[in-house]
Image (spheres, grey):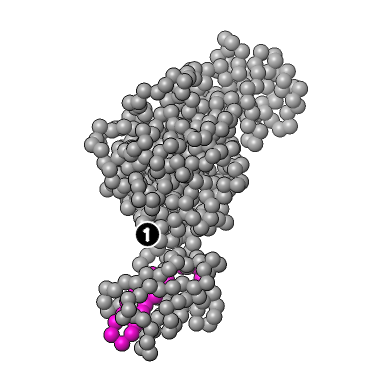
């Protein structure tokens, strides 16, 4: 297979006002074999705590440097170096001072997407691949409020399938960590709009496409000042801002960008990932398009997502390594376009990650008390093996299965339930489904006239092990067993019988 290039090719003309230049340089990292791209004339410093402000100020003044922005939640400060001082010289100066714990360049992140020369593919195979349709039988994302922070190039907020989903606190960040509200949100390069459509496009609205999480809102956090790359200070500030949005319900972060770990991820990257995870925010990161695991996906706190195609093949470009957690559709994915329409050619781990972010949001909507570790476990332990059994370096724990992940998180079986079989292939439906006794008094069955109760009518309800839970003579269920005790969360099969016919159906009960 031909290797897909890492560089994101843009075929759109971007206005100069939106693509103001961010001057960058190549910086040789200690212990690394190749230079990294970073913001010119800037370093990011972590001072030991407590570090007296007066002494810190004197340290800056001694070389004519000035702090340009701080991220106090993770204790990092962006510092502008004096004219003529290189980034390497700045790092050398600060790292030798006893007040300093760590100092890094303001590394530039690249998006993990490609524009292949394949024909337009207008099919959402990704939803079928991750078993989203069955997942929606359990949860569509409306049970409890969730927000997905898309840290990217921005989102085209006027798109017909996105405008109702964009949060009004969407923002952009600069290399000093400053935030400016940006609503309606804008996308300067097209990448973020494609990510947003996958994760949570408006669904069941008789138009366009469906996102993985129907009910989630999208918080667009633009960290790209141009189409070349995004700096680490902007990304760190966006992460902190997303985590602090308590009014948004449970938050999931999606970052489909990164940089090569040579020699490793910076301390700043570790700080913002750990800050998110320790505050209950799952951090979903694209693995990268250069065959290796890139930063920050490589970090232990991130949930690293690689790509598969429509046949569950892992493409050559997808990031691989021991840190990979799972894979999801990332080749010719159908999604929203920043031109207002749709595209069927979104390719890269950038578009695999939002499938997992959407699934994480579904889990948190159904189970808002879930910890970040429980979300991780649900995604990993329910993933479908596509190469070897268990974990491997090319597919992680396997390919994302949103239905199995939800079932795992809720403690129910995602396998076919074994129960007495109906004599005919007659299926009936239940409302509401899923059934939540805390919100609904009864589960009601919609049945053909021939199944209306008579003296021979019997409704039996079985649990996932095929054990009889309840026998009824009516078409409603209160969620209790024959002993009057509350039935546990799970998948239940109901079997209807009368003198001449039998039929069955399925319902998910969520406590």
Q: Is residue 439 left or right of residue 453?
A: right
Q: For this rendering, which residue is in front, 166 or 88?
A: 166
Quarter location, residue 9:
top left
- Give percent across and percent down for residue 173: 55, 29
Read off the residue under disc 1. 134
Q: Residue at x 35, y 50 (%)?
A: 206
Q: Is residue 274 left or right of residue 287?
A: right
Q: Residues within 10 Å of mark 1 (few under 14, many from 20)?
A: some
Q: Is residue 314 left or right of residue 380?
A: left
In the rendered image, the vertical position of residue 172 relative to residue 200, given as above or below:
above
- Give percent across and percent down for residue 197: 40, 42
Quarter location, residue 268:
top right
Q: Residue at x 67, y 28 (%)?
A: 47
Q: Which residues are magenta?
A: 487-506
Residue furthest left as drawn: 119
Quarter location, residue 85:
top right
Element assignment for label 1: helix
Q: For this rendering, which residue is in front, 232 or 46?
A: 232
Q: For this rendering, which residue is in front, 294 or 333?
A: 333
Q: Residue at x 59, y 10 (%)?
A: 83
- Give percent across and percent down for residue 341: 34, 38
Residue furthest top as drawn: 84
Q: Main secondary structure of the magenta part?
A: strand
In the rendered image, the vertical position of residue 45 relative to residue 203, given as above or below:
above
The N terminus: image quadrant: top left
Q: Residue at x 52, y 35 (%)?
A: 183
Q: Is residue 503 magenta?
A: yes
Q: Is residue 194 visible?
A: yes
Q: Is residue 260 magenta?
A: no
């Amino acid at each position: 297979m031909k290797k897909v290039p890492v560089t994101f090719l843009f075929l759109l003309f971007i206005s100069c006002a939106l693509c103001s230049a961010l001057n960058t340089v190549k910086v040789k990292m200690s212990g690394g074999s190749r230079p990294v791209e970073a913001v010119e004339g800037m370093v990011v410093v972590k001072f030991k705590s407590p570090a007296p402000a007066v002494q810190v100020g004197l340290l800056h003044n001694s070389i004519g440097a000035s702090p340009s922005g701080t991220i106090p939640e993770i204790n990092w400060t962006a510092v502008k170096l004096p004219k003529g001082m290189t980034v390497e010289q700045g790092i050398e100066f600060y790292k030798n001072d006893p007040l300093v714990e760590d100092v890094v360049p303001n590394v530039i992140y690249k998006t993990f997407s490609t524009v292949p020369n394949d024909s337009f593919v207008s099919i959402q195979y990704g939803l079928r691949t991750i078993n989203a349709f069955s997942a929606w039988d359990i949860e569509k994302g409306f049970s409890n409020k969730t927000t997905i922070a898309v840290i990217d190039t921005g989102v085209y907020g006027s798109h017909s399938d996105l405008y109702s989903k964009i949060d009004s606190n969407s923002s952009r960040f600069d290399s000093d960590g400053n935030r400016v509200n940006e609503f309606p949100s804008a996308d300067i390069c097209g990448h973020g709009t494609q990510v947003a459509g996958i994760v949570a496009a408006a669904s069941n609205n008789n138009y366009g496409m469906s996102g993985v999480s129907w009910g989630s809102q999208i918080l667009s956090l633009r960290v790209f000042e141009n189409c070349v790359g995004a700096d680490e200070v902007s990304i760190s500030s966006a992460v902190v801002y997303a985590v602090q949005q308590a009014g948004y319900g449970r938050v999931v972060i999606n970052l489909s960008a990164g940089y090569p770990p040579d020699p490793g991820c910076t301390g700043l990257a570790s700080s913002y990932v750990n800050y998110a995870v320790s505050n209950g925010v799952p951090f979903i990161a694209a693995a990268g398009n250069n065959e290796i695991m890139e930063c920050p996906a490589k970090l232990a706190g991130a949930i690293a997502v690689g790509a598969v195609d429509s046949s569950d093949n892992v493409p050559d470009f997808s990031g691989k390594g021991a840190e990979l957690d799972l894979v999801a559709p990332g080749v010719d994915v159908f999604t929203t376009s920043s031109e207002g329409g749709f595209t069927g050619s979104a390719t890269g781990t950038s578009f695999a990650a939002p499938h997992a972010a959407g699934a994480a949001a579904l889990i948190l909507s159904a189970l808002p008390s879930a910890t970040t570790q429980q979300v991780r476990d649900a995604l990993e332990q329910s993933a479908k093996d596509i190469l070897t059994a268990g974990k491997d370096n090319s597919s992680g724990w396997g390919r994302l299965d949103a239905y199995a992940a939800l079932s795992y998180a809720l403690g129910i079986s995602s396998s076919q339930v074994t129960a007495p079989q109906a004599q005919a292939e007659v299926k009936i439906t239940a409302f509401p489904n899923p059934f939540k006794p805390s919100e609904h008094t009864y589960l009601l069955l919609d049945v053909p006239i021939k199944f209306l109760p008579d003296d021979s009518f019997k409704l039996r309800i079985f649990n996932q092990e095929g054990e009889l839970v309840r026998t009824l003579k009516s078409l409603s269920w209160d969620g209790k067993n024959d002993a009057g005790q509350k039935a546990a969360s799970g998948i239940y099969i109901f079997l209807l019988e009368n003198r001449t016919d039998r039929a069955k159906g399925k319902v998910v009960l969520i406590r």
